[in-house]
Image: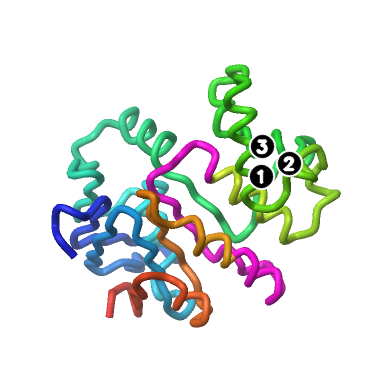
Amino acid sequence: MSTDAILLQALDITKSFSQDGTPAQALKGVSLGVAAGEFVSLVGRSGSGKSTFVSVLSTLLKPDSGQLLYNGQDLALAGEAEIDAIRHRDFAVIFQFHYLLPYLTALENTLLPFMRGLRPVTRVQKARAFECLERVGLADKAQRLPGQLSGGEQQRVAIARALVKDARVLFADEPTGSLDSATGATVMELLAGIRGDGLSVVMVTHNEEYARLADRVVRMEDGLVV
């Protein structure tokens, strides 16, 4: 991979947590570069550090040491307001659980990234949200509440919500972990189909079959890339 092609780069990242008052090192100097439009899967056993690593990559966690470069910018030198703006504008995250608001419709949940600061959404934004629901096959259920949707449909709304703001990097942390195999396969087909056009995808999974849908498989063990 050309250095010029790298959109997001982690260099020698470390991260520790306290367990019963004793430091436990989750990441032990991890490095990774992700190109624009590339789909990378992170695989490894439970406790290997992959979810911690994707949380650092997405700026949800701050590393203890190392560098995180986005579009050539060292985020360690950026202020919290600037990092927050980058996270809101350019990053999107899909978790194992969908985290939909139960009192909002599928369309309204998809619109949530546009509701920052309680600003009213525009007609263009509503059209964009509907387009994203259509992309995940849920245009006909846009007005349904989460409780009226299946688990797979709820996760597809979460994907639409992640797509709605034209993010440049999509992080998916075990996005099929709470789904049955058939529904999980449908969600993975969606994720595999949305990469490209400049959108990078970084996915954590323990499923080897799903991992192989990515352009590149990165294996982690004991807090290191192996």
Circles 3 and 1: CB distance less than 8 Å? yes
* Distance CA(mark 1)–CA(mark 2): 8 Å
Location of residue 154 in the rendering, given as x and y in whole percent from the top left corner: 72, 53
Of all residues, the one furthest to the right in this rendering is: 148
**Image quarter (top left, top right, bottom left or bottom right) of the N terminus:** bottom left
Q: Is residue 189 left or right of residue 10?
A: right
Residue tagged by mark 2? 106
* Distance CA(mark 3)–CA(mark 1): 5 Å
Of circles 1 and 2, the one toward us is 1
**Kind of residue indicated by mark 3:** Phe
Of circles 3 and 2, the one toward us is 3
Q: Which one is in front, 129 or 15?
A: 129
The local crowd at label 2, few if under 14, some if 14 to 19, many if 20 or more residues have their Cα within 10 Å, is many
* Distance CA(mark 3)–CA(mark 2): 9 Å
Q: Quadrant of residue 26?
A: bottom left
Instruction: Determine the secondary structure under disc 2.
Output: helix
Kindly identify which numbered label has been placed on residue 133: 1
**Kind of residue indicated by mark 1:** Leu
The local crowd at label 3, few if under 14, some if 14 to 19, many if 20 or more residues have their Cα within 10 Å, is many
Q: Is residue 111 left or right of residue 138?
A: left
Location of residue 28 in the rendering, given as x and y in whole percent from the top left corner: 26, 69
Residue 169 inside the magenta-drawn segment: yes
Name the residue: 15% across, 53% down. Answer: 4
Q: Which one is in front, 16 or 160?
A: 160
Q: In the figure, 5 relative to 91: above or below?
A: below
Residue 178 inside the magenta-drawn segment: yes
**Image quarter (top left, top right, bottom left or bottom right) of the C terminus:** bottom left
Magenta residue span = 163-187
Location of residue 138 in the rendering, given as x and y in whole percent from the top left corner: 73, 49
- Determine if residue 20 is in view: no
Circles 1 and 2: CB distance less than 8 Å? yes
Instruction: Determine the secondary structure under disc 1.
Output: helix
